[in-house]
Image (tube, coloured by chain):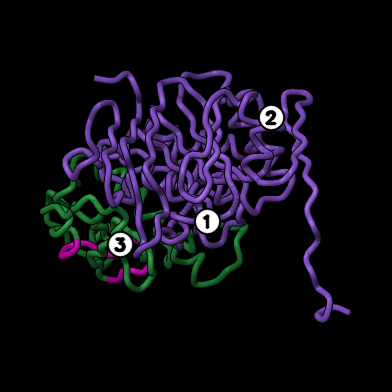
Amino acid sequence: MSDAIISAKQVSQKSGNTYLLKNINIEIYPGQHWIVFGNNGSGKTTLLNVLAGYLKPSSGELYFLNDLYSPNTIYQIYQNIGFVSSSFFDQCFSHETALEIVLSGITGMLSVPFDITAKDVRKAKHILKQFHLYDKMDFPYDLLSKGQRQCVLIGRALMSKPSLLILDEPTSGLDIVFRSKIISTIEALCASSVITILFVTHHANEISSCFENAMLIRDGEIFAFGKTINIFSDQVLSEYFNTPVKCSWKNDNVSIRMYNQPLDLSGIMY
Amino acid sequence: MLTQEMKSRSERCCCRYCGSKLAIHVVIFNQYGGAGAELYCPNCNKIEFGTEPAIYTAAKDFVDEMDFSHYFNLEDNERTYQLNIAKVCDILSWGGKSLGWLDKNGLKYPTENNEVVL
């Protein structure tokens, strides 16, 4: 019996002959806050979809609070995991209203349960008010801006008071105002509650010391994991990117600088 | 999970927005067996839990006769009209559940259209 909230044992995900994830072994403990960092195509989103239970791994075992992911446990797992992923939910929602989508978070399914209570509705409206979406609660999802949709998904994830919050690039495509709001909200969640958080990003400037743990994903494998301050260092990142990297911390945020050869556009541009 | 309740609602209920008959839409969003079946309105192209047809009829007539608009700041078009009907459906359903004449199996008492009102 493990104390981990989620544990993955030799989890792999294949697509044809290609490994999207390979031999993933991780344990996430209650109250921990993790950054999952990696380049485009490194396997971050696949890993999160697997951990959130929306993608069944090709091999390996997944446990949530010592319960094996299975048809008998998956719906209960959905209620305990708040999953935010626009790449996933944009395929599920279109004309559903913001309020309906937030309320669907109660069960972790996609629809509003019949037996919602006044308390549920008040909570959902309160969440939408915090995201300045109270006047948009009856707007269809596809008429909301990208930032508003992200806020709705975050609100949905919080409805069931999840033990684990999985955020897949929640600031993707957002303008500076919304990005700042969402990062502040997540940092406040890290600071004020015991919720466990997995936060995927490929933007270094979103990494702050409120995420005390970090893992680097490369080519579907865990390249490194440990304390954020140790992972985001010159040596580790230079090895990860295969190029000299200068990493510095300022005001609890990390800054990464690297030199890259520009693209060869001769013959195309001039 | 496809339940008996869901099947029953798909046969009995209609969309709160357009009044169309509901369908069962299998949203396969997990691979652990037991695809996510949801009630769906094929006309509105949305996941929709639906309402009793009598409630929809009453709601539509209320919006038409009383020129009701909860969304006065939205453009006056078909979409807004449907939003208003759905809002009244929600109000009537809420009242029905609170007053005990509506549960997940439908209306508990027979209804008939009141021609004087409608």
Helix, strand or loop at mark 1: loop
Give me the residue at 33% from left, 35% from top: A8
- Name the front one of labels 2 and 1: 2
Badge 3 local density, few (<14 within 10 Å), some, or many (20+)? many
Q: Quadrant of the C terminus of chain B?
A: bottom left
Please tell me how crowded label 2 is: few (under 14), some (14-19), or many (20+) other residues with Cα within 10 Å. Answer: some
Judged by depth in the image, the label closer to the viewer, 3 or 1, is 1
Rendering quarter of residue A4: top left
Question: Subunit of mark 3?
Answer: B
In the rendering, which numbered label is found on residue A139? 1
- Residue A264 vs B88, above or below: the answer is below
Q: Residue at x 50, y 51 (%)?
A: A219
- The main secondary structure of the magenta stretch is loop
Disc 2 designates what residue?
Answer: A233
* Observer able to see residue A161: no
Stretch in magenta: B10-20
Percent coordinates x, y for residue A155 in the rendering: 49, 39
Look at chain B in the picture and name its colour: green
Mark 3 belongs to which amino acid?
Tyr
Residue for badge 3: B56
- Mark 1: few, some, or many residues within 10 Å (few <14, many ≥20)? some
Q: Colour of chain A?
A: purple
State the residue at coordinates (57%, 23%).
A227
Front-most of residues A28 and A20:
A20
| Residue A253 coordinates in the image, percent (x, y) | 72, 29
What residue type is disc 2 on? Ser
- Residue B4, given in percent of the width and then of the height, sits at 10, 54
Q: Is residue B76 magenta?
A: no
